[in-house]
Image: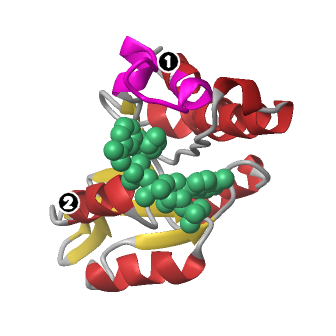
Amino acid sequence: MIFIPLQEGIYKMEYQHYYLVTGASSGIGFATALVLAQNKRNKVIAIARNATKLESLRQASENKIDIFPFDLEKGNLTTLVNDLKKMGVNHLTGVIHNAGYLVSKKFEEINTLDLQKIYEVNVFAPFRLTQHLLPLLKQAKGAHIVNISSVGGIQGSVKFDGLSAYSSSKGRCVY
Ligand SMILES: NC(=O)c1ccc[n+]([C@@H]2O[C@H](COP(=O)([O-])OP(=O)(O)OC[C@H]3O[C@@H](n4cnc5c(N)ncnc54)[C@H](OP(=O)(O)O)[C@@H]3O)[C@@H](O)[C@H]2O)c1
């Protein structure tokens, strides 16, 4: 949080950096959001579907993290961006596309629906979200977009039995 002088003795409080972390209700996203929120200059907005788990994150951060229950597959991104602005987010220093979906099945058992869902969450959702957040990202100096991929997305799925669809989607995150 920084204090911007408006007139003598009157200051406006503003965060220097806003970060948006997707898939923050558990695992890597949960931990990433907590670490970013430790810096007083940062305001973290955490996204996932499970509101109860997000509430645990908010409490773990001692109410420093703003939580936003949202389904990246089905949610309305225009509404999301408008709501972020209403929350006071006027720029974004970083978006961490961490939300991920994994199906563990033999290649011959993967069906079209599995493939569609994996690509919706792991590839198309980050793409669409980035497009909608671009105006806010452009307002920050040196904004970053971080895509959480996987070793399987780089080396292929030979070492990861049953993860061919997942690994192929993670290969698409490296752009
Ligand atoms: N753990 C590993 O060893 C590993 C290795 C390589 C890469 N990764 C990648 O790292 C990322 C995090 O992995 P993790 O192990 O921490 O996974 P995790 O604990 O299962 O977390 C996945 C997160 O994605 C969210 N999510 C899933 N679908 C969503 C949707 N439609 N809308 C919004 N949020 C959604 C889940 O929240 P809700 O269910 O509440 O929506 C959850 O918070 C993933 O992208 C994963 O592919 C993990």
Query: Looking at the image, is 11 positioned above or below residue 60?
Result: above
Q: Left of 87 or right of it: where is 128?
A: right
Query: Looking at the image, is 120 positioned above or below residue 56?
Result: above
Question: Secondary structure under badge 1?
Answer: helix
Q: Which stretch is magenta?
A: 151-167
Q: Left of 111 or right of it: where is 171?
A: left
- Across and down, in percent, residue 102 comes to 57, 43
Work out how far the residue at label 1 is from the one at label 2, CA to CA, in angstroms.
27 Å
Query: Looking at the image, is 135 positioned above or below residue 10?
Result: above
Query: Looking at the image, is 123 positioned above or below residue 172?
Result: below
Amino acid found under the numbered disc labelled 2: Val
- Across and down, in percent, residue 56 comes to 40, 83
Other-residue count near label 2 (Cα within 10 Å), few / some / many at <14 / 14–19 / ≥20: few
Please report the residue visible at 25 percent of the width from the left and 65 percent of the height from the top.
Answer: 34
Question: Is 74 included in the stretch rendered in magenta?
Answer: no
Q: Which residue is mark 1?
A: 171
Outermost residue, right side? 112
Question: Is 161 included in the stretch rendered in magenta?
Answer: yes
**Who comes first in sequence, dot 1 or dot 2?**
2
Other-residue count near label 1 (Cα within 10 Å), few / some / many at <14 / 14–19 / ≥20: many
Q: Left of 1 or right of it: where is 24?
A: right
* Cβ of mark 2 under 8 A from ligand 1: no
Q: Which residue is mark 2?
A: 35
Q: Nearer the viewer, residue 168 or 127?
A: 168
Q: Mark 1 against mark 2, which lies toward the viewer?
A: 1
- Across and down, in percent, residue 143 comes to 35, 31
- Can residue 19 be seen from the camera position used here? no
Q: Nearer the viewer, residue 132 or 122?
A: 122
